[in-house]
Image (tube, helix red, strand yellow):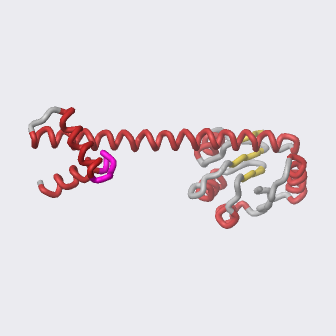
Amino acid sequence: MVEADRDRALQIVDGLKQAGEFDIHVISERTRLAREITAREPDIVLIDIANPSRDTLEELALATGPMERPVAMFVDRSEAGLSDAAIEAGVSAYVVDGLQPARVKPVLDAAIARFRMFHRMRAELAETKRALEERKLIDRAKGMLMKARGVEEEEAYAILRKAAMDQGKRVADVASALVTAAGLLS
């Protein structure tokens, strides 16, 4: 948790302890945010700040980028555009009008759920992109076989599939090898 005010930090810690078992570490200096998050590798980051700045959000983006984790940010007030900047920096929950101990647990639960949903969506998007790239590669390899052997598309795919089975590889891997070899020969 990031909180510079000791009394306020104690209120938040009490709220978290009432909500369940948590291993809580308070970071009082925002300038050490990236270093502390990297060193401690927390499951979730809770930031309580009166008025966030773009510098704080940049520091947060650097801190949470390599090891993605849910981030809940409680702010007393927010300038125009900062909520969008916070979401882009990786904040899962951005709550304006300060932090109240009774709201901590429900907001953290929402931040975790939202983080997991976006994590699944990013994974699905990455898988879809990978599959599309493989499909393009297979189509390119089929086109090369069709031209070189004078066969139809279905037969070209059958040739790729047989080569993949014979070599114990995926069709996409065989297609990649064919396209790479053809590029070296031309």
Q: Locate residue 172 relative to residue 10 in the image: left or right.
A: left
Residue 58 in view in this figure: no
* Residue 103 % position (x, y): 84, 40
Which residue is outermost to the front? 166
Quadrant location of the N terminus? bottom right
Residue 18, position in %: x, y? Answer: 90, 48
Q: Measuring from the top left, give residue 97's x and y in whole percent.
A: 80, 39
Instruction: Judge from the rendering whether residue 134 lies leftward or rightward of residue 53; answer left or right.
Output: left
Closer to the camera, 73 or 133? 133
Q: Which residues are magenta?
A: 167-173
Q: Is residue 18 left or right of residue 4?
A: right
Residues 183 and 74: in front is: 183
Magenta stretch contains residue 123: no
* Quarter location, residue 140: top left
Which image quadrant is residue 42 in? bottom right
Seen in the picture, residue 59 relative to 81 is either above or below; the reply is below
